[in-house]
Image (cartoon, coloured by chain):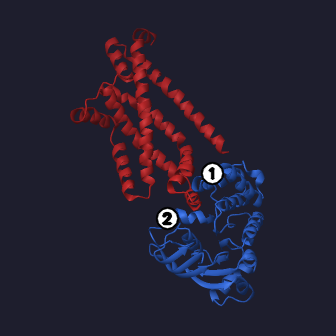
Chain colours: A red, B blue
Amino acid sequence: MINIIASHGSELLSGLGQTVLCSVIALFFSLIIGSMFAIFEVLPSKVLHTIGRIYVEVVRNIPLLVVTMFFYIVIPQYVASINGFVAGTIGLTIYTSAFIAETVRAGIQSVSGGQMEAARSNGMTYWQAMRYIVLPQAFKIVIPPLGNQFINLVKNSSVLAFVAGFDLMYVGNDIASTSFDTINSYLVVGVMYLIITMPLSYYMRYLEKRTNRGAA
Amino acid sequence: MSMIEFHNVEKYYGKFHALTDINLTIEKGETVVLIGPSGSGKSTLIRTINGLESINSGQLVVNGFDLASKKTNMNKIRREVGMVFQHFNLYNNKSVLENIMLAPRVVLGRKDDENKKVAMELLDLVGLADKAESMPSMLSGGQKQRIAIARSLAMHPKCILFDEPTSALDPEMIDDVLNVMKKIAKDSSMTMVVVTHEMGFAREVGDRVIFMDEGQILEDDQAKEFFDGQPSNERARQFLSKIIKH
């Protein structure tokens, strides 16, 4: 392992950087897109509800690799030339957003209906009730499963390796095939993924504890 | 103009006929008690008054607003018609003070210093000024319900609907809540509609008693006549004898 790190340190670091960058971008946008579709699904409007359902069901039931390949091939052909990193990040964002939508929807629906009724009876509009009462409570419930999604997202970013995204996994494959030290190459890559995901995991746990204390 | 007017109101849940030909007028300042066996439509009826339940046909006018019309802005009705629930429904993510101050701030735009002053006066009224900073999860059921009443009053409503406000409470807590409600009833400008099984309260504070069964209003009497005389309706007599025996 030391050998690999010593001889390929800068490539590994750049791969790590690409993985982190892709994850942060995908996390940010999938959280926004996912929350939007989650709200679509709980709205009284039948049309928006159906749009939300279709989006979630289609996207989450197609393998991530297929979604990513779609963006890697279709967008450059018909829309704009984008590289593997961008295509991979879009694919990852879309894919993850469907799971986040499901998670957030479940969170919203687990807040008792009485909370919404009380807020509406108090004169608040639907959106005020959502903003001040329902969503803050839903967010708290959703933190642990959302943490899971974030960790999955980081690991799923390895899909970039298939579309020349120059991420950690891509670099790992490269080193393994040129150095012929396959085991150690992938061991190093595994450890580097842990370096990203472990702090994330602990941070989510900390967040969970902190919000629980706030409610006591 | 009356506070609440039902004319031939019908309500269905699928095939279930929840409200049948409801005709009822409640005047400003009246305290009206709704009683009847469970499943008789009392809660459905009271929930139509602030639009939590829609009606299928007939006319319902509350505080001058026509609830049967799709154009009516429900939020405007609800600003002036408060509601207190069986299960309190305090905002779990907000402190007691915030529970009371939130709607006046975001709905009415009441300024913070005035908002707080009003909230503290109401906490005094319900006897819980020391709980201002508590979270709802730290309160007993009776305390929660008194906060819920204060929250409702903070909007300065013309009318408050109480949907079985003491049914989920330990016996010892019931009096605290009823005492607060009695204080409110003394304010002659406040209209109150109360679904309850507390007959002592109904007799003491109620101006009128409405008896419902199977979605219909069977009896609509002055409270004194209802309790001291005999309800003319057989089913109402039966119900009363069962509920007062113990």
The answer to whether residue B216 is above or below residue B96 is below
x then y, percent, for residue A115: 58, 56
The x and y percentages for residue B77 are 55, 66
**Which quadrant of the structure image shows residue A122?**
bottom right
Q: Quadrant of the N terminus of chain A?
A: top left
Q: Looking at the image, is B229 positioned above or below residue B141?
A: below
Tell me if I can see residue A159 in this picture: yes
What's the residue type where badge 1 is placed? Asn
Quarter of the figure that contains the C terminus of chain A: top right
Q: Can residue B40 be seen in this view?
A: no
Residue at the outermost bottom position = B232
The residue depicted at 63 percent of the width and 54 percent of the height is B110
Q: How crowded is mark 1: few (under 14 residues within 10 Å), some or many (20 or more)?
A: some
Label 2 amino acid?
Answer: Asn
Name the side, left or right, on which B221 lies relative to A110.
right
Q: Are marks 1 and 2 in contact (CB under 8 Å)?
A: no
Q: Which of B4 and A107 is in front in this view?
A: B4
Q: In this view, does A214 lie to the left or right of A147?
A: right
Q: In this view, does A130 lie to the left or right of B152?
A: left
Residue placed under numbered mark 1 in the picture: B92
* Badge 1 or badge 2: first in the primary sequence: 2
Q: Where is residue A159 in the image (x, y as percent from the top left)?
A: 35, 30
Would you call the spot at circle 2 few (<14 residues within 10 Å), some (14-19), or many (20 or more)? Answer: few
Residue A140 in percent (x, y) is at: 57, 44
Numbered disc 2: what chain?
B
**Disc 1 element:** loop
Quadrant of residue A93 within the rendered picture: top left
Q: Name the residue under label 2.
A: B73
Splitting the image into 4 quarters, where does residue B184 fall? Answer: bottom right
Q: Which of B24 and A155 is in front in this view?
A: B24
